[in-house]
Image (tube, grey):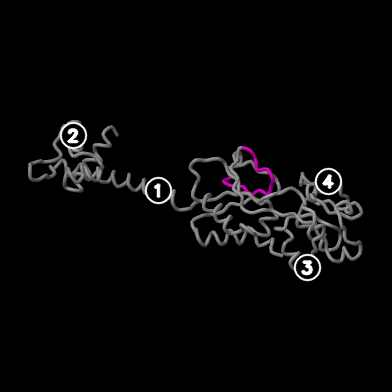
Amino acid sequence: MEHLEEMMTFARVVELKSFSAAALALGTSKSLVSKQVSTLENSLGVRLLHRTTRRMSLTEIGTAYYEHCARILHEIEAAEATVTQLQAEPRGVLRMTTPMVFAEMHLAPAVQAFSKRYPKVEFDIDATERIVDLVEEGFDLAIRITDHPSPGMVAKKIASVRWVTCASPAYLKRHGTPRVPKDLLQHQCLNNPNVVSMRNGWHYRAGNKEVMVPISGNCRVNNSSVLVQMALAGMGIVLFPTYVVGPLLKSGRLKEILSDNTAQANMSLYATYLPNRYMQPKVRAFIDHLVEYFGPEPEWDKY
């Protein structure tokens, strides 16, 4: 539409019954408003308004033409309002990927609390142990537990992740309690071969000294929940983040050992997403919610 701006100006003039009022509403000058209406009339080859020094009125053609202009103006304003609303209010489908065990143990109540606050957001969650490519698979957000967030991604820290070595009281009663990391060489250690940083051994730090202990055991399982159940059954020692075993340590079903040694790297729980100047409100709101819900001292560390 070649003269859309002039049509909108004309509609404002009629709506406000004044060139001056229209100019004020449009943030321009009265002379420019008058010029735009004249340009529109000349392009149509008709007179739309009767003008005198004291009053203004629509011609018959002007009345019919205004109805169409007003409808177009309304649709444009509605479209702009929709964009503004969508930018301000979280809504739509949030596609998210998250580690399976974290989803099983902690994600549901966090999502429930968010949904009460923002009921127009729907969730599509992929709980998996694999590393998902957000670009190729079309995800908005990934929850990651790592010490090195992926390059090229924006990472917002949600909470620190502490790793602890633990076993059931029954196992420790039968086999004794390791006092230093190298004592693990004499114990059954239950390990997840899919965790790359733990595949060749468990890492510890005492003061400024670091040590990697090559662990051994008769069970290797690529599922954290199964490993926890094995530990509870007294089958061996496990090394897990407190978001997995915190409640079991608090209840006494598992007992922390080697507490004088920091296990693994200083990992954190991150919300990671693609760099985007115009981050969608649903993503921004959910990340802020996760930080508020879990941090700064997560509930799983209170044991």
Q: Closer to the camera: disc 4 or disc 1?
A: 4
Q: Give SS at disc 4.
A: strand
Q: Point out the frontmost of discs 4 and 3.
A: 4
Distance of mark 1 from mark 2, alpha carbons? 31 Å
Read off the residue under disc 2. Answer: 35
Furthest residue toward front: 208
Q: Secondary structure at mark 1?
A: helix
Number of numbered labels in the structure image: 4
Does label 4 or label 1 sit earlier along the sequence? Answer: 1
Where's residue 133, x and y in %? 64, 41
Give the labeled residue for mark 3: 252
Label 1 belongs to which residue?
84
> Where is residue 301, by image quadrant?
bottom right
N-terminal label among 1 and 2:
2
Residue 118: x and y in percent read 50, 58
Bounds of the magenta span?
Answer: 139-151
Residue type at tag 2: Lys
Instruction: Report the residue that reaches farthest toward the left.
Output: 53
Residue drawn 68% across the image and 61% down it: 300
Residue 116 left/right relative to 299? left
Q: Between disc 4 and disc 3, whose residue precedes?
A: 4
Q: Tell me whether circle 2 and circle 3 mark residues in contact (CB < 8 Å).
A: no
Quarter location, residue 27: top left
Residue under label 4 = 212
Q: CA distance from mark 2 to mark 3?
A: 83 Å
Magenta span includes 140: yes
Secondary structure under tag 3 reads loop
Q: Is residue 50 left or right of residue 175?
A: left
User: Height in image: 173 above or below 39?
Assistant: below
